[in-house]
Amino acid sequence: MAPDAPQVPLGSGKHPVTLVVIAANQLDASVAFHSKVFGWQLHRAAPDLAGGMPSHGPALALRSGVPEGAAAAVPYVHVPDVKAAMKRIVESGGSEDRAPWSIPLVGTLARFADPGGTIWGVTSAVSPGGSAHVPMPFGANPRPKPGSVCSLEMYAPDGEAAGRWFGEQFGWGSAPTMPQFVGFDAGAGIGGVFQSHTPQARVMVYVYVTDVSGTLSAIESHGGARVGEPMAVPGLATFGYFRDPSGTVMGLIGG
């Protein structure tokens, strides 16, 4: 955010985003791509799923068989009791997208639509390394490890209402940062912004890199495609966008 923008208050730290599942209908190609470009170490967990536990940021999974028009990615929020959390979510204006299911040795998961219609998940799974707080990589904030997922941009028709709702559900902090943007911070793990300008892009996952232009060139060399040119925002960072081999659009934040 710009130096004079309001600071986003920290959340309680009790309910961080611990898992991000990214659509990858060309699973083998996407696994190879993300390994070569970002150094992600992903392993097949099922015919339609590859996952990994990076040393920084949330756990990551690539999933094939995603229907056309479905979310490009789903972030999962840690809760100790998935069924109880889903009950509160539905009673508070959200809706169930997928009922709770369990994965042996991992935990229980479920998906929901928030009151604005954007899909999220909840999970009882925890990161073995914990969920260290990852500030937005702007200004004087410390930078995360290159190649790690560092931020989310989530569509919400009313960002301030979304901030209040997620604050009530999960104890997150939030504050308007720029027109049509409301920052959110769980107090642990990664944060991000609610954006109200582009309903077609309900979820954008950002990866931190030290060189956005160089990474876009590497993306093209390994089967991805850049979406536009890098954009430097004074006081923030340089942003870039790309499609991976499965056609999923993601973002870069860096220098």
Image: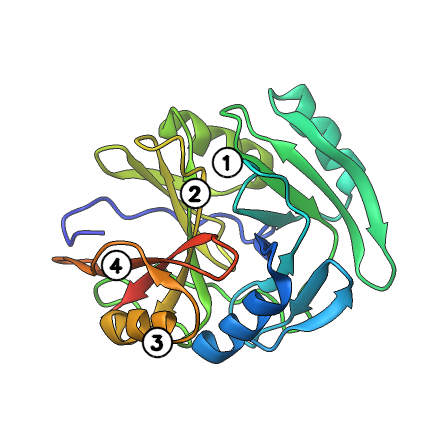
Pick whichever, 43 or 184, lies toward us.
Answer: 43
Give the spatial CA distance, label 1 vs label 2: 6 Å
User: Which image quarter: residue 94?
Assistant: top right
User: Is the Cβ of the residue at disc 4 closer than 8 Å to that at disc 1?
Assistant: no
SS for callout 4: strand
Q: Is residue 147 above or below residue 237?
A: below
Between discs 3 and 2, the one toward the N terminus: 2
Between discs 3 and 4, the one toward the N terminus: 3
User: Is the Cβ of the residue at disc 2 closer than 8 Å to that at disc 4?
Assistant: no
User: Which image quarter: residue 212?
Assistant: bottom left
Between discs 2 and 4, the one toward the N terminus: 2
Tell me which amino acid carries mark 4: Phe
Nearest-to-viewer mark from 2 and 4: 4
Tell me which amino acid carries mark 1: Gly
SS for callout 1: helix
Position of the C terminus, as image quadrant, is bottom left
Between discs 4 and 1, the one toward the N terminus: 1
Give the spatial CA distance, label 4 vs label 1: 27 Å
In the drawing, what numbered circle is on residue 167?
Answer: 1
Between discs 3 and 1, the one toward the N terminus: 1
SS for callout 2: strand
In the drawing, what numbered circle is on residue 173?
Answer: 2
Tell me which amino acid carries mark 2: Gly
Between discs 1 and 2, the one toward the N terminus: 1
Tell me which amino acid carries mark 3: Ala
Residue 52 appears left or right of 82: left
Quickly name the residue at label 3. Answer: 218
The structure residue drawn at horizontal position 39% and vertical position 30%, both measured from the top left corner, is 199
Nearest-to-viewer mark from 3 and 4: 3
Quickly name the residue at label 4. Answer: 239
